[in-house]
Image: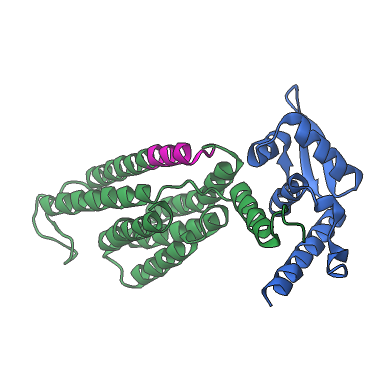
């Protein structure tokens, strides 16, 4: 064997790396998951607190007081709460991911990033519209479970375009969503677990596995 | 040893060509700039290797316009995929023979 050539093993490793780098977006920061989870927990607490003030005993599912404001007002607060949390989470995620990509010398918005976003968005958009339908038909109790299931499907779909670990995360989210579709009425609690606790666990796991 | 190297494809002796094929194996297609960035090459260097692969009919070249700018996409051909797999196999055999 000529000694100045790279060994076959090295060549195979290079091929594998090149395949991964060209087809998967690997700059996604694990810390952004941790932050998203923390925001989600804060948002869930705010919602719980608000519902309590409005006289809803969340865990008993009954109205505790007479002065319950109208449904649209409550809904307005919950939607605003959700939108703020979503913006904070996405914003922090973009910031941290950009920072990580720069540090690693990768480009931020290349074709792999585009594929990741598109494939994450399709199931999420379908889930969002489906939940609107649930809302119009008054099936409120199924909104929280449905979004968890669709979010899990979105993660599984996106896992082909980023670290494969996301796939396991998606499966856990789906299991949680399905469970909450049978144990209805605890949507907020399941959301706090699914969007809060799980994000923190998986984000930290990814952070220590790939960034430490 | 000589027998082992039979399947070793001369076309893939160059690391750049092997790199181009690697990218095209896992992506439906890739354009010139993407390849350039991934492989960290100069325009001329990449162009000459692409030309070689094209002449061997290992890749398809698809020229098109995005607006008024020309854009060239490359994809792996059936022959190219076959050759790449054969090459990987022979690398594998070589590794196994070394570890024994």
- Write the residue at 80% across / 34% down: B47
Please identify which colour was used for chain B in the image.
blue
**Which chain is rendered green in the image?**
A
Position of A184 with respect to B3 (left or right) is left
Please name whichever residue, A61 or A66, is drawn nearer the observer in this view of the structure. Answer: A61
- Write the residue at 88% across / 70% down: B3
- Quarter of the rendering occupied by the C terminus of chain B: bottom right
Position of A187 with respect to B44 (left or right) is left
- Write the residue at 65% across / 58% down: A10
Please name whichever residue, A205 or A187, is drawn nearer the observer in this view of the structure. Answer: A205
Q: Main secondary structure of the magenta part?
A: helix
- Write the residue at 84% across / 65% down: B5
Q: Which residues are magenta?
A: A93-106
Position of A64 with respect to A104 (left or right) is left
Position of A176 with respect to A111 (left or right) is left
Q: Residue furthest top?
A: B68
Magenta stretch holds residue A102: yes
């Amino acid at each position: 064997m000529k000694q100045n050539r790279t060994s076959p093993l090295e060549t195979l490793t290079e091929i594998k790396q090149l395949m991964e780098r060209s087809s998967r977006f690997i700059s996604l920061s694990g810390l952004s998951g941790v932050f998203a989870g923390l925001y989600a927990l804060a948002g869930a607490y705010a919602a719980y607190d608000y519902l309590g003030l409005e006289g809803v005993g969340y865990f008993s599912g009954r109205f505790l007081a007479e002065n319950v404001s109208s449904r649209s007002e409550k809904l307005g607060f919950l939607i605003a709460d959700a939108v703020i949390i979503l913006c904070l989470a996405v914003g922090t995620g973009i910031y941290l991911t950009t920072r990580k990509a720069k540090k690693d010398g990768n480009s931020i918005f290349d074709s792999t990033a585009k594929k990741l976003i598109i494939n994450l968005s399709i199931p999420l958009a379908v889930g969002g519209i489906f939940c609107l339908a649930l809302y119009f038909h008054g099936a409120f109790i199924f909104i929280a479970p449905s979004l968890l299931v669709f979010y899990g499907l979105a993660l599984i779909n996106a896992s082909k375009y980023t670290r494969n670990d996301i796939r396991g995360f998606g499966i856990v989210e789906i299991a949680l969503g399905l469970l909450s579709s049978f144990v209805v009425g605890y949507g907020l609690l399941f959301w706090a677990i699914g969007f809060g606790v799980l994000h923190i666990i998986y984000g930290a796991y990814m952070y220590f596995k790939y960034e430490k | 040893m000589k027998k082992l190297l039979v399947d070793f494809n001369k076309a893939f002796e160059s690391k750049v060509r092997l790199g181009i094929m690697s990218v095209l194996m896992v992506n439906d297609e890739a354009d010139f700039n993407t390849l350039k960035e991934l492989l960290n090459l100069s325009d001329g260097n990449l162009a000459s290797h692409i030309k070689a692969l094209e002449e061997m009919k290992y890749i398809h070249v698809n020229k098109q316009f995005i607006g008024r700018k020309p854009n060239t996409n490359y994809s792996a051909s059936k022959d190219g995929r076959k050759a790449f797999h054969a090459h990987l196999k022979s690398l594998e055999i070589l590794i196994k023979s070394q570890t024994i």
